[in-house]
Image: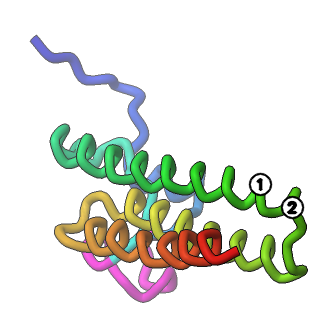
Amino acid sequence: MTTVQKDRTTRTEAAELMPFGGWESTPAGAGLDDDETLFRFPAPDDPAPGTTRLLIMALGAAALGFVAVGVGARAFVTLLGGAPFWYVPTLALFGLLSIALTVGAFLSMHRAFLPWLLLACAAAPLTVDILIAALY
């Protein structure tokens, strides 16, 4: 037995409450309709993503996070031993780029291949971080 909430917010009402990308219902928005918007927060009336898809993406993001923690621990030890002035900003830049790509993957959850592409691309800046941390 299922019940439907009568006061549930629809996508057009959500555009008035939270004007994030993808909820605009007029052509004056980003110039894309809802089917063409790549990044958006899911609206309450969107279908839920598949459990398997969400689990695999979460495990991939967690793996990236665990590797980043290892890089951070190694960078901390290097920083205590004396590191060049560019070391921390460079690690932070590539780490934040990796995080931004991972966030983009979750914001594009309803797309077919874009989330997987973004998660794979998030590994590249993290690999640069690993190389920098390993060399110093």
User: Is residue 131 covered in magenta?
Assistant: no
Determine the residue positioned at 42% across, 40% down.
9
Q: Under tag 2, what secondary structure?
A: helix
Determine the residue positioned at 20% across, 72% down.
113
Above or below, 128 against 5 in this view is below
Mark 2 surroundings: few (<14), some (14-19) or many (≥20) residues within 10 A:
few
Determine the residue positioned at 44% across, 56% down.
64
Q: Under tag 1, what secondary structure?
A: helix
Amino acid carrying mark 2 in the image: Gly
Residue 45: image quadrant is: top left
Determine the residue positioned at 38% across, 76% down.
121
Residue 117: image quadrant is: bottom left
Quadrant that contains the N terminus: top left
Amino acid carrying mark 1 in the image: Val
Q: Nearer the viewer, residue 50 or 56?
A: 56
Query: Is residue 74 found left or right of 127 in the rendered image?
Result: right
According to the picture, the residue beneath numbered tag 1 turns out to be 77
User: Is residue 33 covered in magenta?
Assistant: yes
Mark 1 surroundings: few (<14), some (14-19) or many (≥20) residues within 10 A:
few
Query: Is residue 56 found left or right of 83 in the rendered image?
Result: left
> Residue 59 in the image: x percent, y percent?
32, 45
According to the picture, the residue beneath numbered tag 2 turns out to be 81
Please identify the residue farthest to the left as the structure is shown.
1
Q: Nearer the viewer, residue 78 or 43?
A: 78
> Residue 39 in the image: x percent, y percent?
42, 69
Please identify the residue farthest to the top as the structure is shown.
1
The region drawn magenta spans 22-36
Quadrant that contains the C terminus: bottom right
User: Disc 2, disc 1: CB below 8 Å?
Assistant: yes
> Residue 86 in the image: x percent, y percent?
83, 82
Q: Which mark is residue 99?
A: none
